[in-house]
Image (spheres, grey):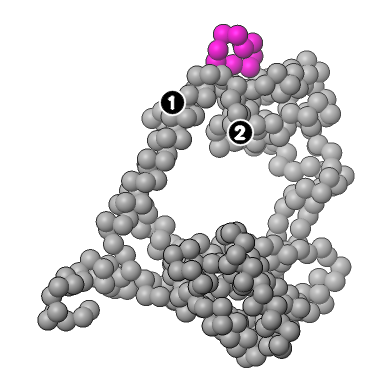
Amino acid sequence: MDSFSRRSLHKTISFAQSSGELSEIWQHANCRSFEIMPDDERPGMVYITEMPPYDRYGIILTTAAGEKDDYRDLPDEIRGAWKADPNGYEQIIRNRLSDAAYSLRASHPFRHYLSTRSRPMTPEEAVDAISEAFDTNRVYQPAIMPLKLNYEDLQAVAAKRNAASKDHAEQTISEYQASISEDIPALFRGLRNPLGPLPKDCRDKLLSFYNSPSLENWDNVARLIISSGRHNTPWGIWTSVDPAAPRSLNMNGDWPRTPDRDTFIKILEVASTDPKLSAAVKTVSADDILKEKLAAENALRSNMGLPVLTEVEVEEAFAETDHEPAPENDSAPTP
C-alpha cells in the first residue's frame, strides 16, 4: 500500500482512539472500507474489520421523498468478484451498475462479535496488516482467538438480559397506566409514545383523519408513534392487521390508499391494548444465549470461508474454560 494511504490510515486510527466514538471508518481510494474499533479494556489497541461489499453496496429503490423503500442484494457473481479481486471491486461495480443507483452503507453485521473474537492490534500492526491485504490483493481477515464458552457466563448474560426485559416491561406498564387517565378522551386512551400519553397535537392529527379520511391526513399520522408494541405506528399496525395494506409508497411518493374508518378504529384499538406484564417480559435461558453465540460464530466463519462449527468443536470450547486446572496446581497438564 502506498505511503500516503498508510499515513491516512494511521491518522484515522489515531482519531478513532481519541474521538470517544464506538468506531471509525477508513476508506481507500478504491473504496475498500475498514472499520476501526478501539479496545476499551486495552488502551492503544484496536480491532480491524474489512466491510464486505454486500454490506456496503446495493440497489436502492427510493420514494420521491427520498426514503428507502426496498433493498436488494447484489448478484452472487458480483459478490464472488470481491473475493477474487478486492482491489478492483469498485471498478467492477461501476462497470456493472453504471445505470443503477448504489450507495455506501457503513455497517457490519459482526462488528461487535468480532471485538470479542479477533485479536486486538497496535496501530502499527493494524497498518501493516491492512497494507499486506492490499499488496497481495486479498480480502483482509482478522486473526481470530480460539472460541471459549462457559455456562456461568451464559447464565450471567441471560440473567442480565432478563432483568433489563423486566425493567422495560414495568416501565411500559407504567406508561400505559398514565395513558388511560380519565381526563384523556376515550378514543385516545391507551395511546402513548416514549415521552408518555399521546400529546394533544398528535391526537388532533388522528382525529382529523378519523373525521376526514384523506391521503394528506393519513400522511400526517401514518408514522406517528402511538404504542409501545413491535408495530408502534398506525402504518405499522395497519400492515400487521391487514395483509393487503401497502408496504411502500408509489414511485411518485404518494400513498396507494388509506385505511377505511373501521380499519382505522381497529388500528387504534390495537395500539391501546393493555400490555400485560406477563406478556411483556421476554425471558431467555443460558441455552438461548448459547444458540445466539453459535449462530454469530457460524456467520463469522461463513464470512471468512470457514466451515460451521462441529459438535466436537463446541464441546472443546467448553472444555477449555469449564475444565481448566486450578491456577495453583502447577503440576497439572495444560489443556
Dot 2 falls on a residue whose secondary structure is: loop
- The quarter of the displayed image where residue 52 is located: bottom right
- The quarter of the displayed image where residue 88 is located: bottom right
Q: Magenta segment, which residues?
A: 180-189
Q: In the figure, is residue 317 to the left or right of 110?
A: left
- In the image, residue 262 lies at what x, y percent? 68, 20
User: In the image, what residue occupies the spot 46% across and 35% down?
Assistant: 168
Q: Which mark is residue 135?
A: none
Do the residues under discs 1 and 2 have CB atoms within 8 angstroms?
Answer: no
- In the image, residue 183 lies at what x, y percent? 60, 9
User: In the image, what residue occupies the spot 28% across and 62% down?
Assistant: 150
Count of labels in the image: 2
> Does 134 sit above or below residue 251?
below
* Picture quarter with the C terminus: bottom left
Q: In the figure, is residue 63 to the left or right of 236?
A: right
- The quarter of the displayed image where residue 73 is located: bottom right
Mark 1–mark 2 Cα distance, whole angstroms, equals: 16 Å
Q: Residue furthest bottom?
A: 136
Q: For this rendering, which residue is in front, 296 or 77?
A: 296
Q: Which mark is residue 232?
A: 2
Residue type at the position of mark 1: Lys
- Please name the predominant secondary structure of the magenta segment in the image: loop
User: In the image, what residue occupies the spot 37% across and 46% down?
Assistant: 160
- In the image, residue 163 lies at what x, y percent? 37, 40
Q: Which residue is mark 1?
A: 276
First of labels 1, 2 by sequence position: 2
**Residue 226 within the segment the image draws in magenta:** no
> Does 103 sit above or below residue 91?
above
Residue type at the position of mark 2: Asn
Q: Residues within 10 Å of mark 2 (few under 14, many from 20)?
A: some
Judge whether residue 82 can be spotted in this image.
no
